[in-house]
Amino acid sequence: MKIRTRTGLFTVSVVAALLGLAQLTNANDAQVKLGGNPKVLSSLLAKDIEELQKALSAAKPEKKDIKRAKVLAMVVGLTAKSLDGEHAGVAAEAAKIVAALAADKLADAKEGAKSLTSAKTAGSANIDLVKTALFDDSENDWDRDLSMQLFKTVRAGGLGIESKVKAWAEKAPSGKDLELVAPFAHRTAAVAAALQQIAPPKGKSTDEWKKYATDMQTAAEQILELASKDKPDGKSLVQAFSRLDRACTVCHEKFK
């Protein structure tokens, strides 16, 4: 009886472990939905592609630039998938770039980035953008630090989004900064949508993780909507950036 009980407990523990591993690695980019006017998203997609090409433009990109390119390729792919079938080729090519960077095939990634603007055919490869970009097989865990790459300072290989969000939560963007609002908000929303598909650190609440990631995406898409108007209202932008900054801050306090 004891042997059967121990066997049963062992079986239960193995099943639980396998279920936990499945939950840990089970991302699905088909579930990612980005809000926004299609024309606006299409315009931002072109800017994302330009930024990706820039990240890989050096003969020997630095590691920090490759990290930025990896996340940008994910953003490009998720954005293209959120648009109509006309962008299926871009989504497929972006997925190949993510896979190439994950496999350290830099030459393939650079070639793929160059051809993004002319990509038309979807192809037959089935590559999950989120999992390929953010899951670290060597650690058997999600690379949550990598997911934040675009928010880091330019010196650290990011785009400086975090510092701008904090600044704009205090004072409305003006001048050339206004040109950054929509692209930064859009990239923030895309990363937040990806975060909803991955697992939190071990021992942390999945429900809370998804809630904060959802709050982050919602706030970012509200900013994008405001920024897309002919004359964005400064006060409304500050309030929206304050909500985004609060969502990010609370999440960092809980999970960092």
Image (tube, rainbow, N blue to C red):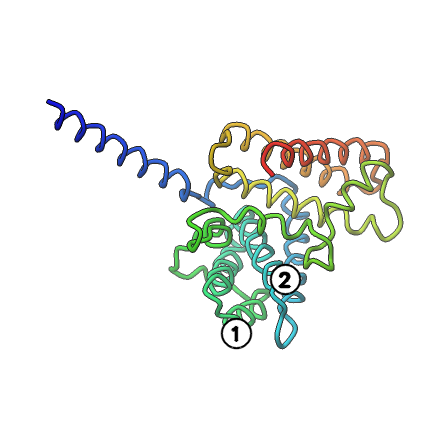
Q: Which residue is the site of mark 1? A: 107
Give the residue type at disc 2.
Lys
Instruction: Say which residue appears at 50% left-offset and 54% top-offset.
Output: 133
Q: Quadrant of residue 63?
A: bottom right
Label number found at residue 64: 2
Q: In the rendered view of the protein, which quadrant contains the N terminus?
A: top left
- As measured in the structure, the alpha-carbon distance from the residue carrying label 1 to the one carrying label 2 is 17 Å
SS class, disc 2: helix
Q: Nearer the viewer, residue 209 or 178?
A: 209
Q: Image point 68% across, 49% down: which residue?
A: 151
Q: Quadrant of residue 46?
A: bottom right
Spot occupied by residue 48 in the image (x, y as percentages of width and height): 65, 57
Please state the horizontal and vertical placement of residue 137, each as a whole percent of the image. Answer: 42, 54
Give how far across and how far down residue 129 sits, in percent: 48, 52
Q: Residue furthest top?
A: 1
In the depicted view, which residue is nearer to us: 120 or 161? 161
Please state which amino acid type lies under the numbered disc 1.
Ala
Q: Quadrant of the C terminus?
A: top right
Q: Identify which residue is drawn at 73% across, 46% down.
A: 182
Identity of the residue furthest to the left in this view: 1
